[in-house]
Amino acid sequence: MKLDPRIAAVTERVIARSARSRAAYLALIDREREHGVDRERLSCGNFAHGFAAAGEDKKAIIAARAMNIGIVTSYNDMLSAHQPYGRYPDQMKIFAREVGATAQIAGGVPAMCDGVTQGQPGMELSLFSRDTIALSTAIGLSHGMFEGAALLGICDKIVPGLLIGALRFGHLPAILIPAGPMPSGLSNREKARIRQLYAEGKVGEAELLECESQSYHSAGTCTFYGTANSNQMMMEIMGLHVPGAAFVNPGTPLRQALTRAAVHRLAEIGWAGNDYRPLGRCIDERAIVNAAVGLLATGGSTNHAIHIPAIARAAGIIFDWADLDALSAAVPLIARVYPNGSEDVNAFHRAGGMAFVIGALLEAGLAHGDILTVWGEGMAAYAKEPTLTPLPLAGGVGGGAGVETPPSEDAAPSPNPSRKREGDLAWAPVPEARNPDILRPASAPFQPDGGMRLVQGNLGRATFKTSAVVPDRWTIEAPARIFFDQDDVIRAYKAGELDRDVIVVVRFQGPRANGMPELHKLTPPLGVLQDKGFRVALVTDGRMSGASGKVPAAIHLSPEALGGGPIGRLRDGDLVRLSADTGTLDALVDPAEWAARELAAPPRPHAGTGRELFAFMRAGASPAEQGGSALLAAMCEDLGESLLGDEEHEARNIENQDIDA
């Protein structure tokens, strides 16, 4: 189907805006391909250090006739999503040998769990863990020993960090390899009920802990559709996974078969063959637009309003919230997954999952089907779901040996037919959703738009996720109550001070102030106030996370309070109007008085829990709309693209208005 003209218009303006920085980036990776560090350019001493402990792979690495895959792993056994990765490297080395390649662990990256640090001091390290992961990825790949990269990561900042780091080596092919979600535990509806009862003081910590432990109960990603699972969705619709890999549970034969296929495929798309697919070419403007389209079509995490621009800038592409807003107006919501629905990602996957979503978007002309992916020709391969085709048993002497079935055009044939396996990978289309309460075609969506809107006015620019908010609460006008910390909000709530119509303002929560922690603790108490009938909303320069829920919220407000953002002019009692209907966010204060007000003084930076180590990242962080990263600010300048100033933003706004008109 022909591409929807609204999607095409956004793509064209991203391409035009990024022309200079993208060209500089592509020139960089071309230079790295031709003149960068690789095995052929290492001295004998350098090279010997690189394979000294490679065991049976030494001869193959020395010969340098086949790809050596650098594995960058985020394994730890504290984080459920990443615990399955413990055995992956040993398995992947075997899979590499099957096709004559080799694999080594290039390095490890931290894997921080926002679920553990939520509402705790460590949460102030969360956003900057993405930059740390990017730096760690770059260090691992800097040795020049590798012709391809296998990136093992799933959760919130880990996938964006892996990509940002790997894009510095964009001349290498790379595949993201997930581990899958844990099986479903306690229902999301029941979990939400217990959390709210706890917020109301009707159950205690013992009941809450039991509820949470039944929800998060085994290895694998958390099953709600937050940032981690939104990451996996994006990797599929950007064509960076083996098709259908996102939501297959850990420890299953299908999961292992998909990992095996990823390793085999990496060996095929290196620069020594005739199907070279470097990461920096796979992630182009169309792939970035696809990521945003998928986010909007599935009601994904608001955190990606920060991560998509960050990933884009790492590839020399400039994508902003006006682009996201324009796409949201064009892309319908075709999935309902908790917290935007009652069912989790396992039910989503059973209903047709990413294969159905991608097929529906391609059919409606809402996604680019012609991007360079790591697999097959364009996105059509991702509109199919994987299965294992059982192998028939052969009779005769010693019967029971596995016999290969002839692969169909959609099968992944084994390079080693004598190897006994569970079955062959094959892919089949998903023409219809298996559960219309979870998935629908673009012609009959749950909501006509993608539910993530730009709101802007005299308080700045912010993100408003409407997909989980009932329409009669898309506009809230109420007096402001100002806070500097989410714990202060909770204390005021418990004291009954918020039992009224109120817009809760939590400021000095941006990247430069304290690392932009998620304010997830505010969801239950604000939800209780809303259920009591009050008109409530949240306005903050912080984040609200992939679990953004039913309470209207203007988040990621930029410019942030630290450094002069107008949110610093607000005072208790000021009337504030937040409207997703009109795309506005304003303090209803006399303009002369507003201009004359002094900005609030920032609180003292927090110390302890390692937060002081990240002071240099806070000091250099870019605005949220530009990715909230000190690394990206430096990279953009290195590519000859300065960060946008106020005048450039104003010119951008005029450009966006012209296109929208």
Image: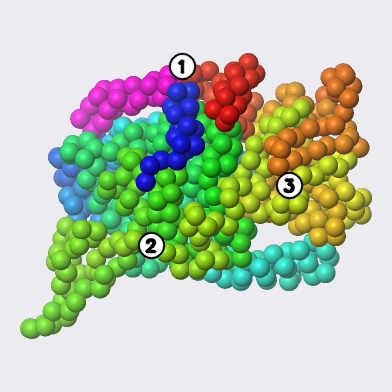
- Label 3 is placed on what type of residue? Trp
Is residue 314 shown left or right of residue 276? right
- What residue span does the magenta drawing correspond to? 19-43
266 lies above or below 528? above
Camera-side residue: 251 or 530? 530
Residue 91's spot in the image, x, y percent?
30, 58
Counting residues from the N terminus, which is met first, the one under dot 1 or under dot 3?
A: 3
- The local secondary structure at tag 2 comes to loop
Marker disc for residue 474: 3
> Marks 2 and 3: CB-CB under 8 Å?
no
What's the magenta bit mostly, secondary-structure-wise? helix
Residue closest to the far left: 397
Does the segment drawn in magenta span residue 21?
A: yes
Q: Say which quarter of the image contains residue 585.
A: top right
- Label 1 is placed on what type of residue? Gly
The residue at the point 90 percent across, 51 percent down is 500
Q: Can residue 174 be seen?
A: no
Classify mark 1: residues with Cα within 10 Å, few (<14), some (14-19) or many (20+).
some
Q: Which residue is under mark 1?
A: 640
Residue 491's spot in the image, x, y percent?
86, 51
Camera-side residue: 392 or 434? 434
Residue 650's spot in the image, x, y percent?
63, 20
Q: Which residue is under mark 2?
A: 431
Counting residues from the N terminus, which is met first, the one under dot 1 or under dot 2?
A: 2
